[in-house]
Amino acid sequence: MFKSVSRQLFKSSPILKQGTQSVSFVRTKYALPTLDYELDALEPYISGQINDLHYNKHHKTYVDNLNKSIESAVEAKSKDEVKKLVALQKAINFNGGGYINHCLWWKNLAPQKQGGGELPSKDSPLDKQITKQFGSIEKLIEITNGKLAGIQGSGWAFVVKNKENGGEINVITTANQDTITDPNLVPLIAIDAWEHAYYLQYHNVKADYFKAVWNVINWKEAERRFEF
Ligand SMILES: [Fe+2]
């Protein structure tokens, strides 16, 4: 799913010695994904200022802290420090979730001139499933917006395909940066309900942001994930 996410190699390449043979390996360092559009290309629905901060500051911080947490965990493991490993799980969950959620987020958005907001193709598998379950895409959007409005504090809403349930579509919310880890649930659309995603433009009226974001949702990407 995240093949497009660029990675950089750590400068250090640990070398393990096994008997007389040397086995070297390199670990990868997570990095910000390359965006398919300019930061101001989602205007007027999401301002360039929000995207600049969201991508270059918030997402970058999750990436940096995920790399630091993993480095610390590798070090703790090498020293057999189990308590430290346990303590690091929270940081890995938060920053790893933040990294994954935001990768989904940027990819499931698109400027209108690149197809953002265009509903799934009529009679595509995704369109058929949504119509069968919800009656219309507008109804699915209404349900998702209702779930987004119900998030207390910070969190995310995910429209997912439930592979365990015949490809049924579910709408799930998570708190903070918790992400979808169940392999049977394929995120089709992830919507960021953190204040940093809307406050500079929509202030306290987050319902307006939830309505507006659908104008730049990349349904083509959702279709691709649905059929994956
Ligand atoms: Fe965010």
Image (cartoon, helix red, strand yellow):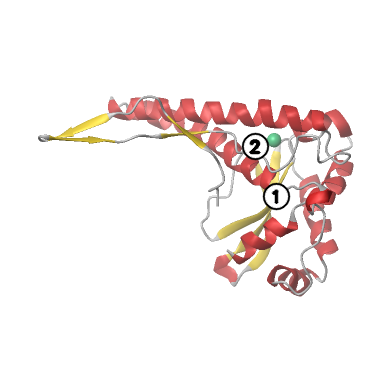
Q: Quadrant of residue 221?
A: bottom right
Q: Position of residue 137 (x, y in %)?
A: 81, 64
Distance Cα–Cα, label 2 vs label 1? 19 Å
How packed mark 2 is, by other alpha carbons closer than 10 Å (few <14, some 14-19, many 20 or more), is some
Q: Is residue 114 above or below residue 53?
A: below
Q: Position of residue 103 (x, y in %)?
A: 62, 42
The first of marks 2 and 1 along the sequence is: 1
Kindly identify which numbered label has been placed on residue 108. 1
Kindly identify which numbered label has been placed on residue 176. 2
Which residue does the image show at 82% across and 58% down from the upper left? 118
- Number of dots carrying numbers: 2
Specify whether 176 is left or right of 9: right
Q: Position of residue 113 (x, y in %)?
A: 83, 50
> Which amino acid type is shown beneath numbered disc 1?
Asn
Specify whether 123 is left or right of 180: right
Quick one: 208 or 107, which is closer to the camera?
A: 107
Whereabouts is ligand 1, in terms of quadrant? top right
Quick one: 55 or 193, which is closer to the camera?
A: 55
